[in-house]
Image: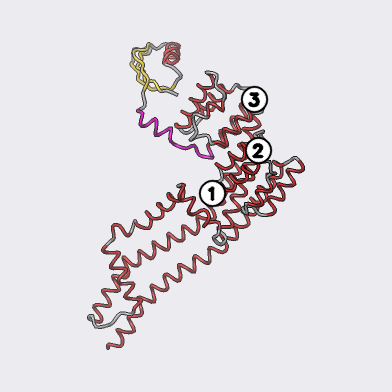
Amino acid sequence: MPQFQFTARDATGRTVTRTLQSDSAQSIMDALQAEGMLVIRIREKKESKFLKKLRSAKPVGLKVLTIFSRQFALLVSAGLTLARALSTMEEQAEFPHFRDILADLRRRVQSGETLFVAMSHHKRAFSPFYRSMVKAGETGGVLEEVLDRMAVFFEKELKLRHKIKAAMAYPIFVLVAAMTITMGILIFIVPQFAQFFEEISEGKAEMPALTQFLLDASDFMLMNFWWVVPGPLLLLVGFFKFRQSRWGHILLDRLILHLPLFGKLSRMVGVSRFSRTLGTLIQSGVTLMDSLAVTRTTADNYVLEQGVDYIRDRVREGEPIYLPMKRSRIFPPMVYNMVAVGEEAGNLELMLHKVADFYDEEIDALVEQLASMIEPIMIMVIGIIVGVIVVGLYLPIFNIVDLF
């Protein structure tokens, strides 16, 4: 919604300058005149093109979409028109960039566009999955049901992401802590021991190999302090940036699937997300071919994307969906057997939701197992690192004693 800055004079003759949001300057003038104020000057505050593009480039968070879908469904089911519902959502939007998106949606809907077409102008905010669901809901006249279904879908997706973060957060935190402790010892403690050894032995004692390695590592870090200290952090950030890129997915996704425990977790997450997305789309009235095309965009795994492409090609040629799922070697037997039963019984979407619910429970159990295993392993790793450093620092004492 545009902002207008105005200067007006009230009944007492006092000049007031303020900024308000409104659809037009005329609506502000009418409101001020109703309050007995005389408008002297009013102008729209233009946002720079750079800032406007920067704001529009921001993606909309999953939590924001969840709340929007839930509230939008309630407003539509209460009988409000789409434009009125969007206007209400616009007024209470918390984030400015999402408020701008809602304002544009409202204007486009008021001008006669369908909600699906209006959302197609904001592909950064509304994914192909979201737009396909909205199109199916508008076509079938069940938009409020589809919006409510999406809210449920996003809530489960948020829980799934929380589980993944919970599984990854602890080992990453412990790894960073171990690196920080090691660097702190090498930078601040080892030089003190090196000076002590030099003074006591007067340079005559030969340092053990482990001690010499620690001393050399400490000297190297002290001489290259300004880039060695932030180096691991920059490498970590660079790795995650590369992981999100297309080449990162191509090179790493297959490797991740073969890692112990984490590979199993990644496969479960992929199967759960595939099943729930495909089931939700089919349940909302999207055709199977279109559903598979949209599901591919939500896979977030290159191997699974290639598998969905293969399944879609075979389904287009007339095969039942469970056969290419079986040949792809991505899905466990339980999954494609459940899909086969669903296709035969005519309730494929129900079976897909059951598969997703089953794997959500399996993910919970595996995350707990990972947490119980990782904690003692990481503690042991930190203990070994600190122990090696302590042993390396105290070994020269025996050589120094032999000198006296």
Lateral position of residue 260 relative to residue 351, left or right: left
Residue on which the image places disc 3: 78
The earlier-in-sequence mark between 2 and 1 is 2
**What's the residue at 58%, 23% (across, down)?**
82
Task: Kindly report which numbered mark, 2 or 1, lies closer to the viewer in this rendering.
Answer: 2
Task: Kindly report which numbered mark, 1 or 3, lies closer to the viewer in this rendering.
Answer: 1
Q: Amino acid at mark 3?
A: Ala
Q: Which residues are magenta?
A: 48-63
Which label was assigned to residue 333? none
Farthest-out residue, front: 317
Residue on which the image places disc 2: 288
- On whether residue 240 falls in the magenta region, the answer is no
- The correct choice, above or below, for 385 with respect to 283 in the image is below
Task: Give the main secondary structure of the magenta stretch.
Answer: helix
**What's the residue at 31%, 84% (across, down)?**
399
**What's the residue at 29%, 66% (across, down)?**
220
Residue on which the image places disc 1: 301
- Helix, strand or loop at mark 1: loop
Query: Where's the C terminus, which quadrant?
Result: bottom left
